[in-house]
Structures are given as structure tokens and as C-alpha cells.
Amino acid sequence: MALPFEKQQVADISGMTTEVVHRLNESSRRMKTIEQRIDHLEQQIQTLEETAITQMDDIRVNLERIVAKVGGVAERLTGIENELLRINKELGKTAAKSEMKQLETYIDIMNPIKSKFITKGELERTLDERIKKHA
């Protein structure tokens, strides 16, 4: 004959076993949910890393282009500066405006079309005539 406490003990063991199984199932479900969340987060992190790498590559390429353009602009500026120096040297060799006016005046004075020249004979005759008038 079984003792009454033995039935209670069997019922307690059965209830405890059911409770342990229930808790194990709940823990398994929670762990599966956590694993799924971790997998999802890992996928998001991987996507973010790939996006960041792609953007960094794009930025690197754009920076290289910018550096190349800046280098080209620097070369062009150096060329322009050299050309300006050459032009300034050439301008230093040219005549100033006042010198050009002076040359123009000399040319106007010596222009045979505008100027009236007299011959030696005409000068001597004119001088002789004046001397005779005053004498």
C-alpha cells in the first residue's frame, strides 16, 4: 500500500517536471528570439559596413579627382604667373607714352611733306637782299 505522502511526492515530481519542461521551452523560445535578433542585427551591421566601405571608396575617388583638379589649376596659375612676368619684362623694353609723343613731335618736325626747306642758294639770295636793304 502506498503512503499518502508518496502520491503527493509523485504528483509534485510530475508537476515539477512539467514546470521544468515549460521553463525549458520558454527559455528555448526566448533564446531563439534573441538569436534571430542577433542575426538581424549582424545583417544590418554588415549592410552598414558595406555601405560605409562603398561611400569611403567614392569619397576617396572624389578626393583624388579634386586633388588632380587642384594640381591642374596650380599648374595653370604658375603658367599664368610666368607669362605675366614675361609680359612685364617685355613692357619694360617698350617705349613709354611720353617717349612716343616726343618721337611723334620729331617726326612731325622732320616730315618733308609738312616742312618747308630752303636751299643754300635761296638762303644766300635772301641774306644778300636783306643786307642790301639795310645798307
Image (cartoon, grey):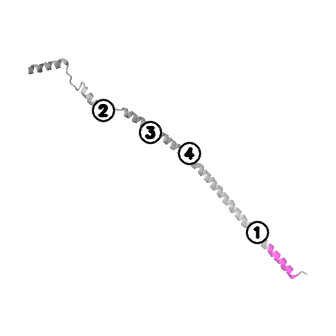
| Residue 61 disc label | none
Provide the residue designation for mark 2: 99
Secondary structure mainly formed by the magenta segment: helix
Inspect the image, locate mark 4, and give the three-letter code of the amino acid beneath it: Glu
Instruction: Categorize mark 2 by other alpha carbons within 10 Å: few (<14), some (14-19), many (20+).
Output: few
Identify the residue at horizontal 42%, vertical 36% (top origin).
Answer: 85
What distance separates the C-alpha of mark 2 from that of mark 3? 28 Å
**Numbered disc 4: secondary structure:** helix
**Image spot of residue 64 (x, y percent):** 56, 45
Provide the residue designation for mark 3: 81
Instruction: Categorize mark 4 by other alpha carbons within 10 Å: few (<14), some (14-19), many (20+).
Output: few
Q: Are marks 4 and 3 in contact (CB under 8 Å)?
A: no
Residue span colored magenta:
3-17
Question: Is 4 contained in the magenta span?
Answer: yes
**Image spot of residue 12 (x, y percent):** 82, 77
Q: Nearer the viewer, mark 4 or mark 2?
A: 2
Q: Earlier in the sequence, mark 4 or mark 3?
A: 4
What distance separates the C-alpha of mark 1 from that of mark 3? 82 Å
Q: Nearer the viewer, mark 1 or mark 2?
A: 2
* Left or right: 129, with 41 as reference point: left
Quadrant assignment for the C terminus: top left
**Numbered disc 3: secondary structure:** helix
Residue sitting at the far right? 1
Identify the residue at horizontal 68%, vertical 62% (top origin).
Answer: 37
Q: Nearer the viewer, mark 4 or mark 3?
A: 3
**Numbered disc 2: secondary structure:** helix
Whether residue 32 is situated above or below residue 123 in the rendered picture: below
Quadrant assignment for the N terminus: bottom right
Inspect the image, locate mark 3, and give the three-letter code of the amino acid beneath it: Glu
* Left or right: 1, with 131 as reference point: right
Q: Nearer the viewer, mark 1 or mark 3?
A: 3
Provide the residue designation for mark 1: 25
